[in-house]
Image: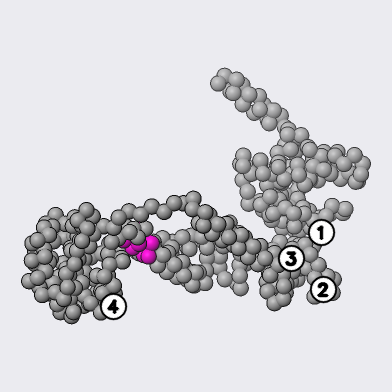
Amino acid sequence: MNTELKLHSLTALFNTPDEIIHAAEKISSEGFTKYDVHTPYPVHGMDKAMKLKSSKLGYITLIFGLSGAAFALLLMYWTMSVDYPMIIGGKPFFSLPAFIPVTFELTVLLATLSTIIGMLTFFFKFPDNNNPLIDSDYMKAVSSDKYGICIYANDPKFEKDKILALFESLHPAKTSEVYFPEKTRYPSLEPKFLVMLLVVAILTSGVTYITLNKLLYIVPFDWMLKQARVNAQSKSDYFPDQFGMRKPVEGSIARGFMPYEYKDQLQQPEKPLTNPLLPTKKVLELGKSKFLTFCSPCHGNYAEGDSRLNGQFPNPPTLHSNKVREWKDGNIYHVITNGQNIMPSYASQISREERWAIIKYIRVLQRAKNASDSDIILSKKESALNGTK
């Protein structure tokens, strides 16, 4: 044996499970802490014999398993209920039973991966592949039909002679000394190694290119490319009108949506709807933005009927007339929703909330254009107060 090499551990081999259990009990009772037992299969009672504490690996599994479940539920909730709400098959936005399979799969996936990675990195010190035991006769024996115990040289109570005497008292089949091997350096710029890297890179690139650019477009590998579906904004030969994007079925109503009860009715309703919005700053800013976008091209920026289209379209009447000013908000909402004369319906372009906000902004324009004496006095008082501040 080369005495210049550093001692790694002392090992002992036994022939039966009972012998290794007795040896483990003896070693642990002597106060050794840096030792390990190797068997070809799990031996019942070994944890108790070695006085092992409960493994902390389970905590890693639990934490990452719960993280996987939480991540899956939050992702599906955000996707289906917040960012892009969709009703599928009449189910609610957050349909927990439908989300269980994905939640289960992600829980198991993260729990399993974290267990394996945690075991290899934190407990086995991965990538510690230079352990002297790996290529020793001792490890070959315990991987087959022997039972072995190994006491490491870094144990606080390690004394070579005493440990060998302790092993002999246990009547092992064989004892051995394991030393750290000499360090071997492998030159990274070896020509053969560089040629091998080049060949691997060329083969990998070639196979990837052929697969992605040629193979996937050849029958029968092109089945994912040619599917019985319609892309957005493309025609379909399945329908007689060749329109791929279909309108909703006539008379269908979306979940949670209350349709306008006077839809397609040209006459003004006897009991128009009431504006549900308050004239807050946020509502008026929304109304102004939508008014300038959809209404001002014809009605003008101040609703005076002075179109911004320079005669390209007939000018509508002013919204400051007594008729419109005396209308209720629901009457204006009715016109925006159903259209009137040459004005089309804007129901598909402007949401219900935006329509009501536009009406609030129109009321502001009407009051500014047709201010009363009390409005002027109040405005002067407010200006004076702001000036004193």
Residue at which label 4 appears? 144
Mark 2 or 4, closer to the camera: 4
User: Given the image, on which type of amino acid does mark 3 rest?
Assistant: Asn
> What kind of element bears circle 2?
loop
- Measured as percent of width and height from the top left, residue 37 is found at 21, 69
Q: Position of residue 345 (x, y in %)?
A: 80, 56
Residue for badge 1:
267
Mark 4–mark 1 distance (CA, rounded to whole Å)? 94 Å
Label 1, label 3: how many angstroms apart (C-alpha)? 41 Å
**Disc 3 or disc 4, which is closer to the eye?**
4
Residue, x 70% and y 38% (percent of image)?
364
Q: Quadrant of the N terminus?
A: bottom left
Is residue 118 highlighted in magenta?
yes
Of the image marks 2 and 4, the number of the one nearer the N terminus: 4
Q: Give the mark nearer the N terminus: 3 vs 4.
A: 4
Identify residue for label 3: 231
Looking at the image, is 342 positioned above or below residue 222? above
Which residue is rendered at x = 68% and y = 30% of the image? Answer: 374
> What stretch of residues is rendered in magenta?
115-124
Which of marks 1 and 4 precedes in the sequence? 4
Where disc 4 sits, the SS reads loop
Q: Which amino acid does the dot numbered 2 rest on?
A: Asp
Amino acid tagged 4? Ser
Residue 21 visible in rendering: no
Q: Amino acid at mark 1?
A: Gln
Label 4 environment density (alpha carbons within 10 Å; few <14, some 14–19, many ≥20): few
Query: Nearer the viewer's eye, disc 4 or disc 1?
Result: 4
Measured along the vertical axis of the image, is residue 89 above or below residue 185?
A: below
Q: CA distance from mark 2 to mark 1?
A: 41 Å
Q: Is residue 306 left or right of residue 273?
A: right
